[in-house]
Image (spheres, helix red, strand yellow):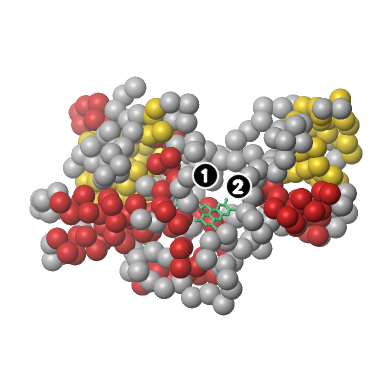
């Protein structure tokens, strides 16, 4: 696997032609437009990425009066993943555990809603005057520690190029659902993201999964008038289902209000029905919508393209736990991606501290000072 350092060899020969070759013709000037190198570029403006940018900015201010040039890019909006969470969701976590940058998160609710969290992170980004560049997707990176080149595309597929001395990758896991590989999964009625129950009112809905997302979706859909069947390959709802949600879903199942099939799996999704393999044989159920809430995973290919090695079945990215620097010098990892496929180990609650760890290591590196931009 080629590391980012190895890739610089080819790009260094002719970096602009490299950009022109991979970014449509006539865009070399766009690619050159922001040629002044940043000290730190954070990829991903979720809660973790924001915390990283704030801490890197602060570390810069403490270490050198001028501060560091820190920017964030996100392929979507600020906190793009949170924005795509269910519209009426309430976080599992109390608001103080979602705080970043030492800014209090006041909420009248015991647990804040998605809208409150979005407002909070917007305000924090504004307070710290973060250099946030939205709707820019990082496609690939070349270069090496001290001189990375970051190739981007905007919403209209226009290319651009940034240079940065250090990279922090905080790209989360919510963009890539774990698919099941069953016939019919590609039908438009099958959703890997649950948003709003209203369109499913009066419809036959199958929810696949046994964890929090599946339990919450099943309950909300049922409460909004859908006929809900839940199917899970495990023997019961997962033990990690939150203690205030578990009795609710279990009682709805016990009362027959939500049908449930455990030790079961979906084998086929048709336009008007689904087929299940259950301990009592094959079942065919009338069906209008399917919510396959079977989890998500980080973009392992993107990490590999950066040269970040991954170990074991859980594809744990190689990084120093003391500094969060990956095996590629100058590339740091932050947030949920640090745990590879074990996406239930790092949340906002603990991922928000990664910024401090990385910033401490950045501050020790002297000089990160600019060399005559
Ligand atoms: C429904 C739901 C409820 C949850 N509730 C809680 C809770 O109560 N408490 C808690 O602590 N955790 C909760 N979590 C988990 C938590 O939200 C995630 O662990 C957290 O968002 C991870 O933060 P992050 O910054 O690492 O990643 P994300 O928030 O996913 O941010 C990653 C960002 O990177 C961007 N990105 C990805 N690839 C690229 C690219 N190539 N170029 C540019 N940008 C890119 C994405 O657009 C995204 O904005 C919940 C998760 C879900 C799904």
Which residue is at a point 87% across and 52% down the rendered structure image?
255
From what the image shows, is residue 335 above or below residue 198?
above
Q: Residues within 10 Å of mark 2 (few under 14, many from 20)?
A: few
Q: Which residue is mark 2?
A: 240
Q: Which residue is found at the position 72% from the left and 36% from the top?
A: 235
Q: Secondary structure at mark 1?
A: loop
For marks 1 and 2, give the CA distance. 9 Å
What mark, if any, has residue 61 been given in the picture? Answer: none
Q: For the residue labelled by badge 2, is the local secondary structure a helix, a strand or a loop?
A: loop
Q: Is residue 176 visible?
A: yes
- Image quadrant in which you'd find residue 363: bottom left
Q: Position of residue 286 (x, y in %)?
A: 89, 39
Residue placed most toward the observer, 161 or 113: 113
Is 124 on the left or on the right of 94, as rendered?
Answer: left
Q: Position of residue 251 (x, y in %)?
A: 80, 53
- Name the spot of residue 62 as percent of width and height, x first: 17, 64
Residue marked by disc 1: 344
Q: Quadrant of the N terminus?
A: top left
Give above or below for 279 relative to 285.
above
Residue 270 seen in the current view: no
Observer-nearest residue: 353 or 373?
Answer: 353
Query: Does residue 207 appear to the left or right of 174 in the view shown?
Result: right
Q: Which residue is found at the position 35% from the left and 69% from the top?
A: 102
Q: Nearer the viewer, mark 1 or mark 2?
A: 2
Q: Quadrant of residue 236?
A: top right
In primary-sequence order, the first of circles 1 and 2 is: 2
User: Is the C-beta separation of discs 1 and 2 under 8 Å?
Assistant: yes
Q: In the current view of this chain or complex, which residue is farthest to the top?
A: 1
Foreground of the two, 362 or 76: 362
Q: Is residue 372 left or right of residue 199?
A: left
């Amino acid at each position: 696997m080629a590391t980012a350092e190895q890739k610089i060899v080819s790009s260094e020969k002719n970096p602009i032609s490299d950009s022109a070759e991979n970014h449509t013709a006539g865009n070399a000037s766009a690619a050159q437009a922001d040629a002044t190198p940043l000290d730190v570029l954070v990829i991903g403006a979720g809660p973790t990425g924001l915390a990283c940018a704030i801490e890197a900015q602060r570390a810069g201010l403490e270490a050198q009066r001028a501060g560091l040039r820190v920017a964030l890019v996100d392929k979507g909006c600020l906190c793009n993943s949170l924005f795509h969470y269910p519209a009426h969701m309430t976080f599992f976590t109390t608001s103080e555990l979602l705080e970043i940058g030492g800014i209090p998160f006041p909420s009248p609710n015991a647990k804040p809603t998605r809208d409150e969290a979005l407002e909070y992170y917007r305000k924090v980004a504004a307070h710290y005057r973060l250099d946030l560049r939205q709707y820019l997707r990082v496609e690939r990176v070349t270069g090496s520690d001290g001189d990375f080149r970051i190739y981007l595309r905007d919403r209209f597929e226009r290319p651009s190029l940034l240079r940065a001395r250090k990279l922090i990758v905080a790209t989360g896991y919510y963009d890539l659902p774990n698919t099941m590989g069953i016939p019919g999964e590609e039908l438009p009625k099958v959703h890997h993201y649950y948003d709003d129950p209203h369109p499913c009112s009066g419809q036959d809905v199958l929810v696949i999964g046994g964890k929090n997302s599946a339990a919450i979706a099943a309950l909300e859909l049922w409460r909004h008038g859908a006929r809900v069947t839940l199917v899970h390959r495990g023997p019961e709802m997962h033990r990690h289902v939150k203690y205030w949600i578990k009795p609710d879903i279990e009682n709805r199942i016990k009362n027959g209000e939500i049908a449930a099939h455990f030790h079961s799996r979906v084998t086929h999704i048709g336009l008007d029905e689904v087929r299940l393999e259950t301990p009592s044989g094959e079942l065919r159920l009338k069906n209008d919508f399917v919510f396959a809430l079977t989890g998500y995973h980080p973009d392992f290919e993107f990490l590999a393209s950066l040269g970040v090695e991954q170990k074991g079945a859980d594809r744990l990215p190689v990084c120093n736990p003391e500094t969060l620097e990956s095996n590629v010098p100058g590339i740091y990892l932050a947030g949920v991606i640090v745990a590879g496929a074990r996406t239930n180990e790092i949340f906002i609650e603990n991922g928000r501290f990664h910024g401090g760890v990385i910033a401490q290591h950045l501050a020790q590196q002297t000089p990160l000072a600019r060399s005559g931009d």
